[in-house]
Image (cartoon, grey):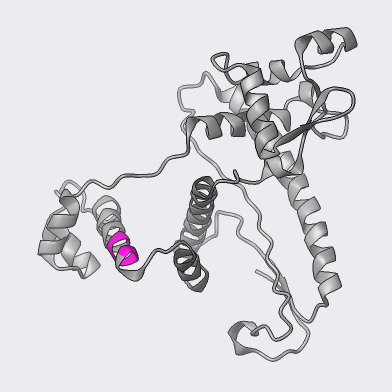
Amino acid sequence: MRPLIGLLLDNGLTYPWFNKIVKSIYVDVAENEFGLQDKKVTDSRVSLITGLYRQEVKRLRMEVDEEYTLSGEAHLSARMIAIWCSDNRFMDEENNPIPLARTPKIAKSRGSQSFDELVEQVTTNIRSRSVLDEWLRVGVVSINQEDEVVLEPSAFFPSKTVEERLYYLGRNVSQHLSAGRANISSAEPPFVERSVFYDELTDESIEELAAFSEKKAMEALTAVNRKARELQIRDRDKSNNHGVMSFGTYYFSDLEEDNKKIGGTDSSSRSHEN
């Protein structure tokens, strides 16, 4: 909970606000996940499960919370980048996104793909020039000397706006915890949920591992992205195409010399794969 509380305090969110949110979520989860078959979920039952007073449960169940959703523009951008990194028309032989001609005219003269073609894979309601201008502004792409649009590494990270970064963080952490919850509740863990931990490393080694981890993580994410898009296209017209999946990675390091040992253990050399 410490990183979460630190994040909340970073953004000026106090305990009374957090307390109100948590109460609402306790009631919502109890109501939607812990009901009895063929029986109406009562305030008394929610009170029994959550430990909240019945009067408070009744009040919270009557409130309608606003849920933050990602903007339509951000969703479109995410889909375009996913296609750029998965569709063979926009990738080289090593599965890297290729530079795209800035205009169809340039693409036609060179026999290559244009940025317009990428945008049209997702929408025909927004001009490709508008998308390009916005992506150039936020650093998602750049223009090289050949007048081509180049996808920048920053495209694989959330928007520069705090709101969208918090949206992605909330979604990713929620899905990670959902996988962990399912694994703990099940006799046989059905979801991949692993990590590697090492201590007694120099700053130079930490930096080397950070670069190595990012490279390997992007290889894995790109491969899963390509496979997921391939299957999504295959399943597009099927009646049972209601499934949702998520696959993610993370890397964290502490460069402080006197960082606390996890669990109060000694400083003896060890590694963990969890």
Rendered view: 111 above or below 92: above
Q: Main secondary structure of the magenta part?
A: helix
Q: Position of residue 62 (x, y in %)?
A: 15, 49
Residue 41 left/right relative to 128 = left
Residue located at (64% from left, 16% from top): 120
Q: Nearer the viewer, residue 125 or 94?
A: 125
Quarter that holds the C terminus = bottom right
Q: Is residue 189 visible?
A: yes
Residue located at (77% from left, 58% from top): 213
Residue located at (84% from left, 22% from top): 147
Which quarter of the picture shows residue 249?
bottom right
Residue 201 left/right relative to 184 = right
Q: Position of residue 153 (x, y in %)?
A: 75, 43
Q: Residue furthest bottom?
A: 266
Residue located at (52% from left, 45% from top): 164
Asked if the stretch drawn in magenta spans residue 18, the answer is yes
Q: Nearer the viewer, residue 259 or 228?
A: 259
Q: Nearer the viewer, residue 34 or 111?
A: 111
Which quarter of the picture shows residue 68?
top left
Rendered view: 236 above or below 58: above
Q: Position of residue 123 (x, y in %)?
A: 57, 18
Which quarter of the picture shows residue 97?
top right
- Say how many tags the image has: 0
Rendered view: 20 above or below 255: above
Q: Is residue 230 visible?
A: no
Rendered view: 44 above or below 134: below
Q: Which residues are magenta?
A: 17-21
Asked if the stretch drawn in magenta spans residue 157, the answer is no
